[in-house]
Amino acid sequence: MLPVVLALTCLLMSADTIRAQSLEVDHLWIHVSPGAPEAAALSAAGLEVDRNAGVVQHTGQGTASIFLRFQNVYLELIWIEDGALLQKVAP
């Protein structure tokens, strides 16, 4: 099993800028094993996987994911489907 990696993108701002703007997080990624068996642990903890979206294949990228949606953010469990394709498109 691959280690869980949490990726959060944010902007670094000066104190003056922070007072003038708010920071909003759109979504978080967690890199998981293929098929996201880790979702079972999140479900056991009371979180609900978005079954309506199902597994989303990221065409041409070599990855796939499932989602856990919240009121103003979503958690994306993402995994590598095609390592060779991912190596071709990754910088």
Image: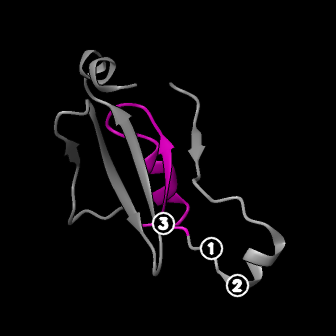
Categorize mark 2 by other alpha carbons within 10 Å: few (<14), some (14-19), many (20+).
few
What amino acid type should be assigned to the residue bearing mark 3?
A: Leu
> How far is the residue under mark 3 from the one under mark 1?
24 Å
Position of 21 with respect to 58 (left or right) is right
Rendered view: 13 above or below 9? below
- Which mark is nearer the camera, 3 or 2? 2
Contact between marks 3 and 2 (CB within 8 A): the answer is no
In the image, 56 versus 15, the foreground residue is 15
In the picture of the structure, the residue carrying the numbered disc 1 is 23
Residue at (31% x, 65% y) in the render: 50
> How far is the residue under mark 1 from the one under mark 2?
10 Å
Position of 24 with respect to 20 (left or right) is left
x and y percentages locating residue 49 in the rendered image:
36, 61
x and y percentages locating residue 86 in the rendered image:
30, 24
Position of 49 with respect to 13 (left or right) is left
Rendered view: 8 above or below 22? above
What amino acid type should be assigned to the residue bearing mark 2?
A: Ala
Residues drawn in magenta: 25-48
Q: Residue furthest top?
A: 84
In the picture of the structure, the residue carrying the numbered disc 3 is 47
x and y percentages locating residue 84 in the rendered image:
26, 15
In the picture of the structure, the residue carrying the numbered disc 2 is 20
Categorize mark 3 by other alpha carbons within 10 Å: few (<14), some (14-19), many (20+).
some
Q: In what element is the residue under mark 1?
A: loop
